Amino acid sequence: MASAPAETPRARTRTRYRRRLRSRIILGFVLLGFGLTALFAVSTLALRDRLESQLVERTLMLEANSLVQQVEADPAAPKYFLTFDAKTWSDRKAYTVDPHYRDLSPGIHDVRQRAPDGTLRDYKVAIKKGRLENGEAFTSLIRYDVTEAAQTAIKLRQGVVWTVLAFTLLSFLLGWWSASRVMSPVLELARRLKKSRAGLDEPLANDFADDEVGQLAAALDEYSARLTHVVQRDREFNADVSHELRTPLAVIRGAIELLLARPDLDEKTRNRMLRIQRSEQQCTDLIGALLLLSRNERGSGSTDVAKVSEQLLDAHRAQLGGKPVTLRVEGQRGLVVDAPESAVTVALNNLIGNAVKYTSEGEVVVRLQPLAVDVIDSGPGLSAEDAARLFERGYRGTHAGHSQGGGIGLSIVRRLCELYGWNVQVKPGAERGVVATLTFG
């Protein structure tokens, strides 16, 4: 059997910040700003490079065609150009041409060449083939220096990068401001809810605008009212039932005490009366414990655990029905718990009752420790499924069979442990049986 379910720990900081609505709003603004700015920048650069390249290439080809036409018309006439370098050579004089250009095929080429001053220059080169009237072939070259344009493009890219970063930062600041404005009423609503853990003294919706947050506050007000009504009705019901049951139990207790006081009572009848008296006391303790649970109130008291254990074992000895089972208490006496006797009795009685129920022979030992109690039996033990689900309300173990009980006893023990800060753990014994440990915190 497993220990009582522990409270789930809070999520780690990383998970908490990932799930925060404010962080998600800020992240959305940052991604949107970065994405739009980057897309605009990339599109601008691509369009600029494409248009510039098309313009230069078209101009180069026009100049190359013009040069070829001039040479074909009059090779000796001076050639004219606007902003380009030009050169024409025949095939037989190709060896005199710079190797960077000699073997270029007709068309547009990108050439990087070191200038006489030692700097690297970038050129766009247009090559065009032509033929003179005498049939001699020649090649015309138009070269355009794009170094300055390339440097300008680099500066433009750097400027675009800084612009993207600046707009991303601006998007972050805008997102932070917007998220703070948007989340302010939500955070205020959460603060009000945390402040009023015991219940809403005043309606929340009165302090919020008639928007989504206001509608949420109104829904919370309505839910709180319904929940308060249900809890109040449940508490009143429990108090009424407790009051109505205590009266007949008090009558039974008084009648039993009168009957036990009679000197002519035979031993058999006296034992039956004592059994009824113990059952009445168990009912009284159970009603008191359930009333504490329904109110979620920790009652005070000073309870001797050894004394309660002895009384419970005496009660269960009378119910063994001839089973060869020994019930005993061992360990240190003197363990006193700051809790009502009814709560300690109900918790221990469920653990001892389960041990006695499922032990057909052997012994059930209540071992007292400085701050805990072990209930050890020699029964059939428990399965892995039982260990995982033992403290679920309504769950009955594999060995329950057709025995009486609704699987509520250990659920009550778990709730008492949550109320008083105790801990209950049930695990298989070393060789057989089960060891149930109730630790008083």
Image: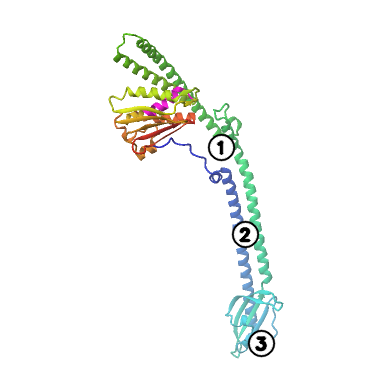
The number of discs equals: 3
The one of 33 and 129 positioned closer to us in this rendering: 33
Q: Which residue is mark 2?
A: 41
Residue at mark 3 to residue at mark 1: CA–CA distance: 84 Å
Question: Is residue 33 depicted above or below 362 in this figure?
Answer: below
Q: What's the residue type where badge 1 is placed?
A: Glu
Element assignment for label 2: helix
Tell me where residue 392 appears, x and y as whole percent.
Answer: 40, 34
Locate residue 214, reporting x and y percent: 57, 34
Residue identifier under label 3: 75
Can you tell which of label 3 and label 1 is closer to the viewer? 1
- Where disc 1 sits, the SS reads helix
Using a 10 Å C-alpha cutoff, classify the residue at mark 3 as few (fewer than 14 neighbours), some (14 to 19) or many (20 or more).
Answer: few
- Considering every residue shown, the one lying at the far right of the view is 117
Q: Which residues are magenta?
A: 339-352
Which residue is at the front of the view, 46 or 6?
6
Q: Amino acid type of disc 2?
A: Ala
Is residue 391 highlighted in magenta? no
Is tag 1's residue or tag 2's residue first in the polypeptide sequence? Answer: 2
Q: Is residue 311 left or right of residue 225?
A: left
Calculate the distance from the C-alpha at mark 1 to the C-alpha at mark 2.
37 Å
**Foreground of the two, 126 or 430:** 430
C-alpha span from label 3 to label 2: 48 Å
State the quadrant of the N terminus: top left
Q: Which residue is mark 1?
A: 212
Does residue 148 sit above or below 103 in this rendering? above
